[in-house]
């Protein structure tokens, strides 16, 4: 959407791997945004990052960054255990925080963020960029309109492969740093997209295990889910799958919609199959194809700017992100307690509101204690 206003002033906290995706997206949006500052505890890394992306200001401390200038948006690209504290810091400075997933490591942290959001009037948004690909936007529109009929069945699979060496990095595979295994750190993008299409879930029955990898967290989880709208779904999150794929399938009354990709999709990764007698839906699906656009950070960042300029609430909001995080927490709670978990059941001082492991992991830790 064209804009005549000056470019938004943006900063990034954390200049590791994922920050490059954010900076590249901002570079592509140079007419609408300007990356003016970065902060990282590793100043050498920050300097290299700033040199690559022509960022004029470098800081070692996020507080110094926030005190240095006025910003419209601050991207948080640090390890997961720092997301919630930094998001609070940014909101208290009167700035919107855009946080890489997961927003926080527990439902309790999410609720604390909600309190800060209420207190400051600032917002915390979560990066779930797969919601913003053109086909996903189109699917939500068609589903909401009723054109596809009721959603009946869904499949959501994140089947990835990570070798043992992946967990040599000290902070990987730790509940206290990452919050969980593929359920929290890998499959969350796919089931967030599923939730954005099917709406609120009502009940989860799950299994999780450490089958093969040297990790304290699970390396696979499987869930059966009922949605408030009546649909039934299966969700698999794995780091044990040599042929990697990310796959979603939605069976509505009048059509099947499928997506298979790996880390980002284009139109070619989607397949639409109308039910007999509903062939006209294929025309609706084809309307608005954008074959050259890949789902990614640019689409979500651009959507934030569009929302601001049209007076709408940008996404992904804290309440929506909490629903996705509650899905992960309920998966763990059901798996480790051996019982189904209903939406809203994890509340108060329930151990699974305080941490994703709930103090109930049935296997022994293998990771060395971080110093």
Image (cartoon, rainbow, N blue to C red):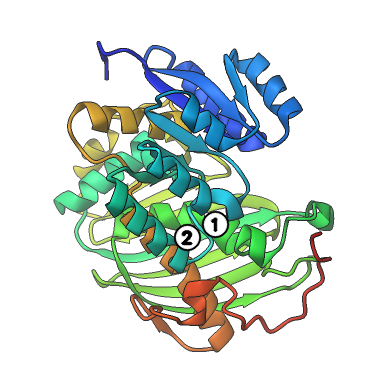
Residue 180 in picture, x, y percent from top left:
61, 64
Taking the spot 36% from the left edge, 53% from the top edge, the residue there is 116
Q: Is residue 353 above or below residue 253?
A: below
Q: Is residue 287 above or below residue 332?
A: above
For the question of whether residue 83 can be seen, the reply is: yes
Residue 60 in picture, x, y percent from top left:
65, 32
Would residue 106 be found to the left or right of residue 345 on screen?
right
Residue 343 in picture, x, y percent from top left:
34, 75
Camera-nearest residue between 368 and 145? 368
What residue is pinned by disc 2? 156
For the question of whether residue 223 can be seen, the reply is: no
Taking the spot 79% from the left edge, 60% from the top edge, the residue there is 370
Element on which disc 2 rests? strand
What residue is pinned by disc 1? 187
Q: Is residue 155 above or below residue 94?
A: below
**Considering only order in the chain, which callout, 2 or 1, is on the residue closer to the N terminus?**
2
Element on which disc 1 rests? loop
Please tell me how crowded label 2 is: few (under 14), some (14-19), or many (20+) other residues with Cα within 10 Å: many
Quadrant for the N terminus in the image = top left
């Amino acid at each position: 959407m064209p804009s005549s206003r000056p470019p938004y002033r943006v900063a990034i906290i954390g200049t590791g791997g994922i920050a490059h995706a954010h900076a590249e997206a901002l570079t592509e949006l140079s007419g609408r945004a300007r990356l003016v500052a970065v902060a990282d505890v590793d100043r050498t890394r920050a300097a290299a990052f700033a040199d690559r992306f022509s960022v004029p200001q470098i800081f070692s401390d996020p507080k110094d960054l926030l005190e240095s200038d006025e910003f419209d948006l601050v991207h948080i690209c640090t390890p997961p255990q720092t997301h919630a504290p930094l998001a609070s810091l940014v909101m208290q400075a009167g700035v919107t925080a855009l946080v890489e997933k997961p927003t926080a490591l527990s439902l309790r942290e999410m609720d604390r963020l909600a309190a800060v959001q209420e207190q400051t009037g600032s917002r915390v948004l979560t990066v779930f960029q797969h919601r913003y690909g053109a086909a996903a936007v189109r699917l939500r529109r068609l589903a909401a309109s009723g054109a596809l009929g009721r959603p009946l069945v869904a499949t959501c699979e994140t089947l990835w492969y990570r070798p043992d060496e992946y967990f040599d990095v000290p902070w990987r595979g730790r509940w206290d740093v990452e919050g969980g295994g593929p359920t929290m750190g890998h499959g969350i993008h796919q089931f967030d997209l599923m939730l954005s299409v099917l709406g609120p879930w009502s009940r989860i029955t799950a299994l999780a295990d450490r089958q093969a990898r040297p990790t304290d967290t699970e390396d696979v989880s499987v869930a059966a889910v009922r949605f408030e709208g009546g649909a039934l779904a299966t969700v698999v999150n794995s780091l044990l799958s040599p042929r990697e794929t990310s796959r979603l399938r939605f069976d509505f009354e009048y059509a099947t919609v499928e997506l298979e990709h790996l880390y980002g999709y284009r139109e070619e990764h989607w397949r639409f199959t109308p039910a007999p007698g509903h062939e006209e839906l294929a025309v609706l699906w084809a309307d608005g194809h954008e074959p050259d656009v890949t789902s990614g950070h640019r689409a979500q960042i651009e959507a934030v700017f569009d929302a601001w300029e049209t007076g709408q609430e940008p996404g992904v909001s804290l309440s929506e992100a909490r629903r996705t995080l509650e899905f992960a927490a309920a998966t763990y709670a059901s798996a480790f307690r051996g019982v189904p978990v209903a939406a809203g059941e994890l509340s108060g001082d329930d151990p699974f509101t305080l941490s994703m492991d709930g103090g109930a992991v049935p296997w022994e830790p293998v990771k060395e204690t971080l110093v």
